[in-house]
Amino acid sequence: MQKKPSERIKELGLILPPAPPPAGLYKPILVVDHFLYISGQGPMQNDGSLIIGRAGHDMTMEEAKIAARQVALTMLSTIQTHFGDIDKIKRIVKTLGMVNSTPDFGQQPLVINGFSELMADIFGAENGVGVRSAVGMILPGGIPVEIEAHFELHH
């Protein structure tokens, strides 16, 4: 039997940063029927500051991928803070990964793998992988990655 997400977080020794306060007029999370929607999250560090940078400019693909992994930790913190029990999540359904990158940077999918790989580690190979888009754009505050996601909840 697969371990609970909360057990995997402990096993992996993950440290969750503080959940960021909303940066505008929106809800951090919203539950509709059996789905949990998470607003776009940036890479919050453990000290409450954000990772800043632009892939292809002052940040390598590997550095941006680390930032995407940090977004996963930020999202888990947001879920725990605003929703509660992470073990109520059945699976990730959809991810929209946005990468602050130069026009000639074409490795957005590899960057977002930093998020997706950690979700697969926590929720398992089947439930931790959903549908996904990875695109390049300009992001607020100079952050390198912003990700929003939808999760299915256990009935």
Image (cartoon, rainbow, N blue to C red):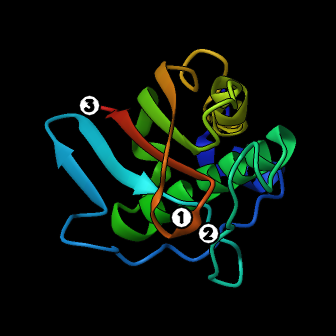
Residue 25: where, in percent of width, then height?
18, 71
Q: What residue is disc 2 on?
A: 44
Residue at 20% across, 48% down: 31
Q: Nearer the viewer, mark 3 or mark 2?
A: 2
Is 143 on the left-hand or right-hand side of 7? left
Residue at 66% across, 47% down: 68
Mark 2, secondary structure of its residue: loop
Foreground residue among 61 and 1 = 61
Q: Give the quadrant of residue 14.
A: bottom right
For residue 8, above or below residue 131: below
Mark 3, secondary structure of its residue: loop
Q: Amino acid at mark 2?
A: Met
Residue neighbourhood size for the residue with mark 2, other residues' Cα within 10 Å, grouped as few (<14), some (14–19), many (≥20): many
Is 41 on the left-hand or right-hand side of 26? right
Is 88 on the left-hand or right-hand side of 10? left
Q: What residue is disc 3 on?
A: 155
Q: First in sequence: mark 1 or mark 3? A: 1
Give yes or no for contact between labels 3 and 2 (Cβ–Cβ under 8 Å).
Answer: no
Residue 95: where, in percent of width, then height?
45, 31
Mark 1, secondary structure of its residue: helix
For residue 1, above or below residue 59: above
Foreground residue among 137 and 78 = 137
On residue 9, which mark appears?
none
CA–CA distance in space, label 3 to label 2: 31 Å
For residue 91, above or below residue 146: above
**Quick one: quadrant of the C terminus?**
top left
Q: Amino acid at mark 3?
A: His
Q: Give the quadrant of residue 1.
A: top right
**So how many labels did they put on this image?**
3
Foreground residue among 73 and 126 = 73
Give the residue at the far left of this rendering: 33
Q: What residue is disc 1 on?
A: 77
